[in-house]
Image (spheres, rainbow, N blue to C red):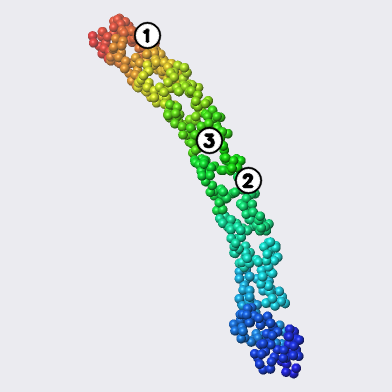
Amino acid sequence: MILSPGPLSSAHAEHENDCDACHSGLDKQAQDDLCLDCHEAVAGDRSNGTGMHGRLPGGTAGRCTTCHTEHRGPDFVDQALDPDTFDHTLADFPLSGGHRDVECAGCHAPGDKYRDAPAECVSCHEQDSPHGDALGEDCGGCHTPRGWQEGGKFDHGATRFALRGAHDELACGACHAGERYTFESLDCVSCHRVRDVHLGVFGAQCESCHSEASWNETRFDHSVETGFTLRGAHAGQECAACHHSGASALPEDPACVTCHEGVDVHAGRHGDDCAACHSEQGWDTGAFDHAREAGWALPGGHGELSCRQCHHGDLTDELDATCRGCHRADDIHGKEQPDDCALCHSPVQWRGTPGFDHELTRFPLEGMHGLAPCLACHRDHRFAQAPGACNDCHAVDDAHDGKLGGECASCHTPNGWALWRFDHGQETGFKLEGVHADVACAGCHRLAGDSPPTTCGGCHAADDRHNGEFGLQCDHCHKGTTFGDITW
């Protein structure tokens, strides 16, 4: 062994004394063949173009010694590649998705050849699989290297149940709870029974009403299937609102009262023909023409009343059509008033008397009376008993304290207390002239009902400077304008 360039590595130690095991004289090409004779797996890769040795540039023509060396001692480890820079696309397992972030040691166990690392998913991920043995070992049939929860490529259409509509958006576990992947039945109810809001009363054929696009999207044609078209308020009802015992439990009679007898506010008094008054649009949407059917139009506020405010019994019961027939309890006027409330009141406005003509009474409203509210005179609402004399209403306003009697109209007018119309000369025979015209009534009429004297001395005796020597007829000498104006 004088010509040996150095001791062999521990892997080739058995050939320490057999140079011909690796060398063939001066034929270097034969030397590569001797390497491949021992390293059969590498020879297979180079022959088939697989593995790293089969994919290296010039792999089939390359020399083994280009990368691998020997005769450096038993402790020498031939590391021809750098794990940090190795191009994994040269291997039989290109790194994609999540595999790119895995450390080499995560797949290549220490001391094992790199080529011996397993390529099957289950070899590395068996402990991560939540499925156990339920779905076999072909993880790639559903999952991709991008991630367990992402990018599934399983074609559910290849099974007996293609995913359509809302089913296609569900997570696998929504149907395959507990890793159950085999089902005896694929009917809707096999999955949805526990969430059946109908509690099974509508049977097991969910698809007859519901769609896979959405559970709330129904396709049942009630008109075609049952002969009862859903109109108005019926169209918005839940199925169970009418079908209490299941979809197949149809009412024997589709009349309104069959369903609505329990909510009949009339308690059956108005008969069974609800449609005669009500509409499918809603209970409050009436179809009854009161003017045509009852011969009594509902004017003004009457049209806003509920039927029961007038019809306390059956609809066919005869009613008193007069105002007092319904409003007797509301009548605050007593029996003195006539029964025809419309003489004063209007159906549009009960308060106020827009229809009453006071001119037709014994007391037409003149002047300021026309502006006074009714209750200013009719305080007890007994209109027929209202007094007609001025003093009956205005005694408290009498500035004369009753001294001039109760016939206020003798002097005053309805247009205002300050507007006079009394002619003193015509009414009493004593014309007010001169200073007399400016004297207040009470200046002469000091007591109610008295008859003041018409002679000068009767009023002015206290002012007579003649002490009665010339009699009581002062006007023989004096004028009415002033005592100082003497005519004699």
Are circles 2 and 1 on residues that touch, CB within 8 Å?
no
Residue positioned 45% across, 22% down in the render = 322
Which amino acid type is shown beneath numbered disc 2? Answer: Gly
- Tell me the kind of residue under disc 3: Ala
With respect to residue 259, does 192 lie above or below?
below
Please give the residue where the numbered disc 1 appears in the rendered image: 450
User: In the rendered view, would you say 312 is above or below 94?
Assistant: above
Q: How far apart, in angstroms, are the residues tagged by discs 2 and 3?
A: 27 Å
The one nearer the camera, 478 or 161, is 161
Dot 2 or dot 3: first in sequence order is 2
The residues tagged by marks 1 and 3 sit, at their Cα atoms, a distance apart of: 89 Å
Q: Which residue is mark 3?
A: 255
- Considering the numbered disc 2 on the image, is that residue within a helix, a strand or a loop? loop
Q: Position of residue 254 (x, y in %)?
A: 54, 37
Name the residue at the bottom extreme: 2
* Crowdedness near tag 1: few (<14), some (14–19) or many (≥20) residues, C-alpha within 10 Å: few
Number of callouts in the render? 3
Q: Is residue 161 placed above or below 251 in the rendered structure?
A: below
Name of the residue lying farthest toward the left:
488
Q: Could you say which is closer to the camera, residue 190 or residue 411? A: 190
Query: Which of the 4 image quarters holds residue 91?
Result: bottom right
- Residue denoted by label 2: 200
**Callout 2 crowding tier (Cα within 10 Å): few <14, some 14–19, many ≥20:** some
Q: Earlier in the sequence, mark 1 or mark 3?
A: 3
Circle number at residue 231:
none
Front label number (2 vs 1) = 2
Dot 1 amino acid type: Asp
Which x, y percent locates residue 292? 42, 29
Locate the N terminus and report the quarter of the image it occupies: bottom right
